[in-house]
Amino acid sequence: MTHHPKGGMCCACQHARRNCSTLPFKTMLPIQRDANTVIVRCTDFKRQG
C-alpha cells in the first residue's frame, strides 16, 4: 500500500517546493483509497498567503 498526500493540498501549501517525502504519510488521516494507494490529509499543510 502506498500513501500519498492529496495533490490539491500540495499545490496550495507554503511547503510546495519542499521535498516532503520523509513525512509520515502512513500515519495521516486517509481521505480516499483504491487498490494500491491511500490518499491522505497532510498534517504539515500550511496554506499559502
Image: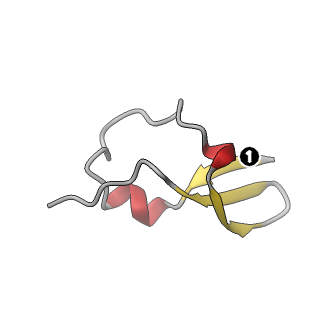
Residue 33 in the image: above or below residue 25 = below
Q: How is the image coloured?
A: secondary structure
SS for dot 1: strand
* Residue at (34% x, 58% y) in the render: 11
In the foreground, 26 or 10: 26
**Residue 9 locus on image (x, y percent):** 41, 62
Quadrant assignment for the C terminus = bottom left
Q: Is residue 29 above or below residue 25?
A: below
Question: Which residue is at 62% across, 52% downward?
Answer: 28
Left or right placement of residue 31 versus residue 22 in this view: right
Question: Which amino acid type is marked by label 1?
Answer: Thr
- Count up the numbered dots: 1
**Crowd class of label 1 (few under 14; some 14 to 19; many from 20; radius 10 Å):** few
Say left or right for 42 vs 3.
left
Report the front residue among 8 and 47.
47
Is 16 rendered above or below residue 38? above
Residue 30: horizontal and vertical position, in percent?
67, 62
**Is residue 6 found left or right of 19 in the rendered image?**
right
* Nearest to the observer: residue 31 or residue 34: 31
Give the residue at mark 1: 2
Could you say which quadrant of the image residue 39 lies in?
bottom right
Residue 17 image position (x, y, % from top left): 30, 40
Q: Position of residue 44 (x, y in %)?
A: 42, 47
Q: Residue furthest left?
A: 49
Residue at horizontal 48 percent and vertical 52 percent from the top: 43
User: Which residue shows up at 34% across the image and 35% down it?
Assistant: 18
